[in-house]
Image: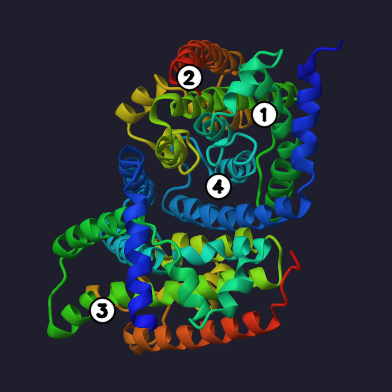
């Protein structure tokens, strides 16, 4: 049954968003620019210096592009989880829990924010440019890394997104706290992790495994040894990390749902 | 009867003071991003000790003041007037015995007052504990900084009022506000100091109100610019934007009558 329900829901949500055309177009543009703003910041920084954390402009742009594409895909797929606090506050979550469909799937399909396509487009455009211009010596393995890094990174981001927003089951204002993890790791991932001090690196690059979204795949593509001295196999570990992240997120989500008792409203 | 505007300032302050847990949660995000942005700027300054007049102390002060001012000088999330225009409730607001623009400005100043206490002071204190903040050398700078922040709020209000008023014509101003939310951040000197931009970009931005929001108050604090000139520039934009806002509101409300609500 669920196989037929969700496509119908998603299609109707997409149609409803195209109603206010001018506003929708501007929303897409805003998402496109929003994703490119960090690129502007990177380019401005490189008008002043020639390297950042030991990487040159092309290399940092490659990391930014991998992170942006992965984040854009994750945002499109699971960004709707940010509305979880609203579902809890209004008591709508009770309704979702009663239905014979997956609760998480219902929340994620409640509104497919089509405007977020803007982010993916911006990310892919810069990624194409970066892959073509950063002097990568292509081998079959590197082609595989380039093709799998954005979807793998998206899975990591999506897991982080679900796990971080699950704090809403415990905290009333969980959304802002979750944002500092989700958007914070997006920001952190756009730059080489060498710019962060040991504490930030441990939290936002390894505890939240942001380093596997862009930094390690970029090292693999560029054929560079890690300036921080991490072993080479970590550069190819992203799919494994993604699988672990999904497992962790599922565990956190189940614990949260089980603890949920309703607000009584 | 007392003028309603001072009461609206107090009401605006109290309205936001109610949501203390929300303010605390928002602070977490401000601080995390402050740490990340400070790390990037410090990494830039590791390549060269001074970039366009910013040393490490000036750069981290720039970051922590910017993170603090974020909620005082709002860029995002103000869709109240646009929503009331779309639903037609604005008719009630226009019928009340007050000047709608002045009333909204008074409420916004009250909101900003609470934000100074709850959202500006804590990130700066946090920054001062863990980073080498550059404090003003001249006592008068504190007064100039306070005035510059107030003017920054008024300029930001002027821009947001105009964007919201676009709902008279577009019905839904969310797209316009979203574009401003993302463009405003980089143009106003929130992400990277405007002094690091190429010359042509700085020249172009000098003809817009954007630097008045963040870069000007921060420059006044860092004593990088002549304070009176900086304040005069902000005042110019504040007056101009408010004046244009009045004209737009007048035109828009006429249109509303034609539509019949």
Q: Under tag 3, what secondary structure? A: helix
Return the disc, 2 or 4, that comes first in the chain's sequence: 4
Position of residue A256 measured from the top left corner of the image (x, y, whole percent)? 64, 80
Foreground: disc 3 or disc 1: 1
Vertical side of B226 occupied by A214: above or below? below
On residue B56, the disc is 4
The Cα–Cα distance between marks 2 and 3, rounded to whole angstroms, is 53 Å
Badge 1 and badge 4 both on one subunit = yes
In what quadrant of the picture does the N terminus of chain B appear? top right
The residue at 16%/70% (across/down) is: A136
**Residue identifier under label 3:** A148
Closer to the observer: label 2 or label 4? 2
Label 2 residue SS? helix
The residue singled out by tag 1 in the image is B108
Tell me if A21 is positioned left or right of B188 in this view: left
Q: Is residue B180 left or right of residue B139?
A: left
């Amino acid at each position: 049954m669920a196989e037929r329900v969700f496509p119908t829901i998603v299609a109707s949500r997409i149609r409803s968003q195209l109603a206010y055309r001018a506003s929708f177009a501007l929303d897409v543009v805003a998402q496109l620019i929003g994703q490119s703003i960090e690129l502007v910041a990177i380019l401005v920084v490189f008008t002043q210096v020639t390297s950042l954390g030991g990487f040159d402009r092309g290399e940092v742009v490659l990391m930014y592009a991998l992170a942006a594409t992965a984040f854009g895909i994750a945002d499109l797929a699971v960004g709707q989880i940010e509305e979880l606090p609203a579902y809890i506050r209004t008591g709508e979550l009770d309704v979702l829990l009663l239905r014979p469909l997956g609760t998480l799937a219902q929340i994620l399909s409640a509104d497919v924010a089509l405007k977020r396509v803007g982010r993916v487009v911006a990310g892919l455009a810069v990624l194409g440019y970066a892959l073509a211009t950063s002097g990568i010596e292509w081998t079959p393995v590197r082609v595989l890394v380039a093709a799998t890094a954005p979807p793998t990174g998206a899975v990591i981001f999506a897991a982080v997104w679900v796990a971080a927003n699950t704090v809403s089951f415990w905290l009333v204002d969980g959304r802002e706290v979750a944002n500092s993890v989700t958007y914070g790791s997006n920001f952190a991932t756009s730059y080489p992790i060498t710019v962060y001090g040991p504490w930030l690196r441990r939290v936002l690059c390894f505890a939240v495994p942001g380093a596997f979204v862009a930094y390690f795949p970029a090292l693999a593509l560029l054929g560079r040894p890690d300036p921080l001295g991490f072993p080479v196999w970590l550069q190819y570990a992203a799919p494994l990390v993604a699988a672990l992240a999904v497992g962790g997120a599922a565990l956190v989500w189940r614990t949260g749902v089980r603890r949920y008792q309703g607000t009584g409203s | 009867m007392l003028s309603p505007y001072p009461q609206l300032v107090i009401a605006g302050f109290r309205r936001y003071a109610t949501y203390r847990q929300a303010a605390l949660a928002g602070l977490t995000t401000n601080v995390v991003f402050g740490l990340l942005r400070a790390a990037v700027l410090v990494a830039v300054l590791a390549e060269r000790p001074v970039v366009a007049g910013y040393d490490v102390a000036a750069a981290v002060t720039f970051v922590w003041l910017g993170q603090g001012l974020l909620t005082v000088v709002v860029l995002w999330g103000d869709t109240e007037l646009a929503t009331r225009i779309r639903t037609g409730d604005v008719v009630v607001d226009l019928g009340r015995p007050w000047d709608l623009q002045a009333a909204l400005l008074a409420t916004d100043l009250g909101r900003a007052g609470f934000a100074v206490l709850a959202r500006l002071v804590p990130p700066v204190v946090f920054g001062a504990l863990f980073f080498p903040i550059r404090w003003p050398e001249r006592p008068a700078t504190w007064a100039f900084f306070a005035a510059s922040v107030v003017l920054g709020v008024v300029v930001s209000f002027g821009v947001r009022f105009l964007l919201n008023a676009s709902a008279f014509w577009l019905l839904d101003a969310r797209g316009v506000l979203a574009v401003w939310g993302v463009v405003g951040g980089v143009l106003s000197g929130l992400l990277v100091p405007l002094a690091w931009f190429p010359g042509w970009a700085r020249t172009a931005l000098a003809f817009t109100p954007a630097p008045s929001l963040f870069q000007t108050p921060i420059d006044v604090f860092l004593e990088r610019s002549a304070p009176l000139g900086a304040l005069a520039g902000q005042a110019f934009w504040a007056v101009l934007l408010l004046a244009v806002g009045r004209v737009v509101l007048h035109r828009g409300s006429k249109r509303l009558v034609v539509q019949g609500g």
